[in-house]
Image (cartoon, rainbow, N blue to C red):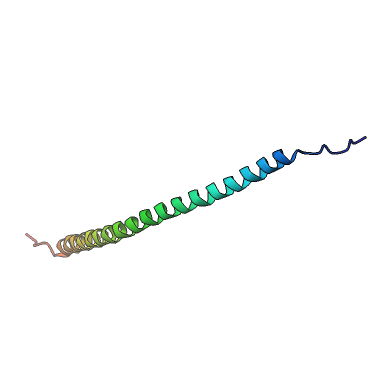
């Protein structure tokens, strides 16, 4: 047999709703702060990526040239004695 629900004090109801709203406001402010911080980090990473990509392209070009020189040397006919 179920009992009738207990009547909750208006003070407790007010406290619960207040804490809920404070928590939501805190979460929104915290999320906003973290989003701004992450945006700055991504901007810095984007700049670093451009530099890193340029270095990789240069390294790849050097590697390809070295490989081409090595293949050219290997493909030269050797003098017969």
The percent position of residue 50, horizontal first and vertical second, equals 29, 61
Vertical arrangement, residue 11 with respect to residue 71, above or below: above
| Residue at x 22%, y 62% (from the top left corner) | 58
The percent position of residue 30, horizontal first and vertical second, equals 49, 48
Q: Nearer the viewer, residue 46 or 4?
A: 4
The answer to which image quadrant residue 15 occupies is top right
Vertical arrangement, residue 54 with respect to residue 12, above or below: below
The answer to which image quadrant residue 56 occupies is bottom left
The N terminus lies in which quarter of the figure?
top right
The percent position of residue 37, horizontal first and vertical second, equals 40, 52
The percent position of residue 33, horizontal first and vertical second, equals 44, 51
Q: Nearer the viewer, residue 2 or 47?
A: 2
Classify residue 67 as left or right of residue 30.
left
- Judged from this view, the residue extending furthest toward the left is 81
Classify residue 72 as left or right of residue 49.
left
| Residue at x 22%, y 63% (from the top left corner) | 61
| Residue at x 24%, y 59% (from the top left corner) | 55
């Amino acid at each position: 047999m179920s009992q009738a629900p207990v009547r909750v004090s208006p003070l407790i109801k007010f406290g619960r709703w207040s804490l809920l709203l404070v928590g939501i406001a805190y979460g929104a402010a915290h999320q906003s702060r973290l989003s701004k911080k992450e945006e700055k980090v991504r901007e810095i990473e984007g700049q670093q990526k451009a530099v890193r990509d340029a270095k990789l392209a240069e390294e790849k070009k050097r590697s390809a040239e070295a490989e081409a020189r090595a293949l050219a040397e290997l493909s030269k006919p050797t003098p017969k004695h």
